[in-house]
Image: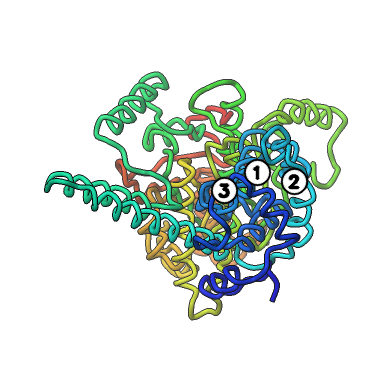
Amino acid sequence: MTAHQSGSVHDGYHLFRHSRPVGDLATVHKLDAARGAAVGVLPYAVPAEQAVLGALMVRNALYDELGGMLRPEHFYVPLHAAAFAALEHLINVRGVEANPISIEGQLRETTFGKQGGLLPHLKSMFENAGFAGDIKSVAEVIQTTYLQRQLMGLGDGVKREAEKAPTFEAVGAIIASVGDELFRLSGTGTANTERTARESLREMLDQAERAMQAGGLTGVSTGFMDVDKLLGGLQRSDFVVLGARPSMGKTSLLLNIAHHAAKRMMDGEQDGAAVGVFSLEMSRVQLMQRMVAGAANLNSQQIMNGQLSNKNFESMTQVMGGMAELPLIIDDAAGLTIQQIHSRARQMKRKHNIGLLIVDYLQLIRSPTLRGEQNRTQEVTEISQGLKQIARELDVPVLVASQLSRNLESRENKRPLLNDLRESGAIEQDADVVAFLYREDFYLARQLGAGTEEVTGNDQERRKVMELKERLEKAKGITELIIAKNRKGPVDTVRLLFRAETTTFQSFAGGAHV
């Protein structure tokens, strides 16, 4: 087994502790001149360091999978520490590809760059990075040896200080210092999330000031006044679920919100946001057709079928010109796992500073760890928790569409309830806001069925059909957005108006959405 292969964490530890480094070990020593101790005195895992660096140079996207668990000081070889720091700078600060040439350029004026042999060593790691395993398990090997070195150094330091400690107070100070250091080491690879009361109050005050300036909005505006009034906008770090049966308009509402938030951002308004969209069902072209149709007040089917008049085509191209600069990023890869969404969302946050993430829809997300119908509830639990984690980690609202159980179709009152969420337990528990779409006209039209233009049957049946038609005419387009759960405020129902020809929603009062 070569240095770039890996198994479990423990297998990886033994493998990378004892396998040979990539390339010429003499080069490693030469480039490691800054280290005083000889290789072998302290625990180390040079092949693991090379495997991780090589894999990251081949696929920069793997950096996001690490989730901040590695820092430059975790690497034993100073060159590798410098290379990792350069890689982070290239990806996070400059936003360019990190490869052997760009890393060598970043380090050219350092001691490593001036010694010679840097680029061949980087290329050797790159070319030998046939790494297809779990990069986190190999990163844990690097973490483990780092912690071992830190503990060994701490032990030696404690021994020296204890021998010189003349008083009880001096020994107590050593013990306190050791406790602080052990606590620091226990947090290796995790973000510092603790805040003082002063810091927390400052954040709260900033939020209150933003709300006053934005007329009560503390989050991202949805574009619907009554919804924003009820929720205060879509709040940072919130996991928001929009549930409905098929054909109720889930995707349309998500796109309306995405367009509005991105346009507000482009116009410089603080309640707008750059928007990332994961579309697991529809292609990005289909999404843009819907969005353009709504913005240009055109029939989306006519756009798709090429049935536009010259005048409408001109209107469409004008709208497209204005939409081209929207801070809207669409990823339409199908069959993504929750881990892949997490990784790609981190990239969106880093590259585009998204302030809102939309996923359409939850039941199409896969979990690589669980399979089979009997594990579906566990799978949805993992996915739901993963979406909440993304919201917390990126500090953005995550708005996710969710299918509802078909059981509600058997009820006379088909307005959704919380227990209609498919595999509802985990979703309901994790979500900060749960909203449902309900359109009575959909069910009335289905009840009428096809071919009702010619009313047949007895007088009672004809009257029933006529009543249904009257109800349908009155209910046409009227949509209930039912806020069934709101962790930070009241629950209520907001009315919207759905325009089927443009697949857009408007405020029920008649105001345009955007």
Residue 105 picture quarter? top right
Instruction: Locate residue 179 relative to residue 125 in the image: left or right.
Output: left
Q: Secondary structure at mark 3?
A: loop
User: Which residue is the site of mark 1?
Assistant: 87
Q: Is residue 499 at least partly visible in the picture?
A: no
**Mark 3 burial class by Cα count in 10 Å: few <14, some 14-19, many 20+:** few
Residue 195 picture quarter? top left
The percent coordinates of residue 347 (x first, y second) are: 61, 45
In 3D space, how far apart are the residues under numbered discs 3 and 2 (Cα atoms)? 16 Å
Q: How is the image coloured?
A: rainbow
Quarter of the picture containing the N terminus is bottom right
In 3D space, how far apart are the residues under numbered discs 2 and 1 (Cα atoms)? 14 Å
Instruction: Locate residue 108 relative to residue 401 in the image: left or right.
Output: right
User: Which residue is the site of mark 2?
Assistant: 118
Mark nearer the viewer, 1 or 3: 3
Q: Amino acid at mark 3?
A: Arg
User: Which residue is the site of mark 3?
Assistant: 35
Mark nearer the viewer, 3 or 2: 3
Quarter of the picture containing the C terminus is top right
Mark nearer the viewer, 2 or 1: 2
For marks 1 and 3, the one nearer the N-term is 3
Taking the spot 52% from the left edge, 70% from the top edge, the residue there is: 9
Q: Nearer the viewer, residue 139 or 357?
A: 139
Q: Amino acid at mark 1?
A: Leu
For marks 3 and 2, the one nearer the N-term is 3
Q: What is the tally of numbered marks visible in this picture?
A: 3
Q: Amino acid at mark 2?
A: Leu
Q: Nearer the viewer, residue 406 or 127?
A: 127
The percent coordinates of residue 270 (x first, y second) are: 49, 24
Taking the spot 44% from the left edge, 66% from the top edge, the residue there is: 381
